[in-house]
Image: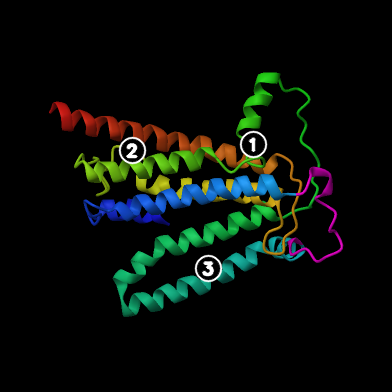
């Protein structure tokens, strides 16, 4: 949330020059993530004991029922949400416009969470017999079932820090958000999807390591993981390219022109 506020405030030129609290909240978020990873590594059950408490209720069954009727549920929720936004727009149109982004973010986040935790507690393993050793080692490093430090997480933190440094050192980024962007999309729009991927990889890690909100720990195969990796190629690749060009251009303009 701190990162999203920084991006939005940067576009509106509302970040104070001494916004030290933005750095603190960002550091707190990263520190909590790392601390949770260390605690889970120290306190989680061994691999062969994750099904030991199989007699208690598993809320995954409810989610599986919801997922089987997801089309009807999503349409009803969207209808209620749009109706609520229309009512807000009648009262205050500008507030309704400001609510569009957080409402869409929350909705996509919930759908992503349901997609990650649905299914069986023990899924059939993927066929990895044809992989080479180097490929296996690389996939092990980006296996978000084992650790929460993902590519979207790292890229999100780097982009947010660069926006803060740009504001502090008065090196403005040429973001072109007025409709005349040189790119098909904007860095602000891509940040939205990067944060969704960051949450998706976090959900994958959590549900493979511990119980969460009454949902039992699951041993998932790589299908959902690879779906996240596929989206990373699209959104993280485009974000990295646009961000590097933006930073490089800002530095050239500031120091040489």
Q: Position of residue 133 (x, y in %)?
A: 70, 19
The quadrant in which the N terminus is found is bottom left
Residue situated in front as seen by the camera: 116 or 203: 203
Q: In the picture provided, is 193 more to the left or to the right than 164?
A: right
Q: Main secondary structure of the magenta part?
A: loop
Q: CA distance from mark 1 to mark 2?
A: 31 Å
| Residue highlighted by disc 3 | 78
Closest to the observer: 187 or 57?
57
**What's drawn in magenta, residue-wise?**
45-60
Q: Which residue is mark 1?
A: 143
CB within 8 Å, label 1 to label 3 = no
Foreground mark, 1 or 3, reads 1
Q: Secondary structure at mark 2?
A: loop
Identify the residue at horizontal 65%, vertical 51% (top origin).
Answer: 206
Identify which residue is drawn at 78% across, 25% down. 129
Quadrant, the C terminus = top left
Q: CA distance from mark 1 to mark 3?
A: 33 Å
Q: Which residue is mark 2?
A: 183
Q: Earlier in the sequence, mark 3 or mark 2?
A: 3
Q: Position of residue 21 (x, y in %)?
A: 33, 55
Q: Upstream in the sequence, badge 1 or badge 3? A: 3
């Amino acid at each position: 949330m701190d990162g999203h506020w920084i991006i939005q405030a940067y576009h509106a030129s509302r970040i104070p020059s001494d916004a030290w609290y933005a750095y603190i909240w960002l550091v707190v978020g990263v520190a909590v993530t790392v601390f949770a990873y260390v605690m889970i590594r120290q306190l989680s059950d061994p691999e062969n004991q994750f099904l030991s408490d199989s007699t208690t209720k598993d809320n995954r069954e409810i989610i599986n029922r919801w997922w089987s009727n997801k089309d009807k549920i999503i349409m009803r929720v969207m209808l209620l949400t749009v109706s609520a936004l229309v009512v807000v727009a009648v009262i205050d149109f500008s507030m309704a416009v400001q609510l569009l982004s957080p409402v869409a973010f929350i909705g996509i986040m919930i759908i992503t969470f349901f997609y990650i935790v649905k299914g069986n507690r023990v899924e059939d393993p993927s066929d990895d017999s044809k992989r080479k050793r180097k490929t296996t080692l690389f996939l092990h490093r980006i296996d978000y079932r084992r650790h929460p430090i993902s590519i979207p997480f790292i890229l999100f933190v780097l982009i947010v820090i660069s926006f803060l440094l740009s504001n502090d050192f008065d090196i403005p980024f040429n973001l072109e958000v007025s409709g005349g962007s040189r790119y098909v999309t904007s860095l602000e729009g891509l940040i939205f999807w990067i944060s969704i991927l960051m949450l998706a990889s976090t959900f994958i890690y959590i549900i493979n390591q511990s119980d969460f909100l009454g949902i039992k720990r699951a041993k998932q195969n790589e299908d959902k993981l690879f779906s996240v990796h596929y989206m990373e190629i699209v959104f993280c690749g485009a974000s990295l390219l646009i961000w590097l060009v933006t930073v490089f251009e800002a530095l050239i303009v500031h120091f040489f022109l």
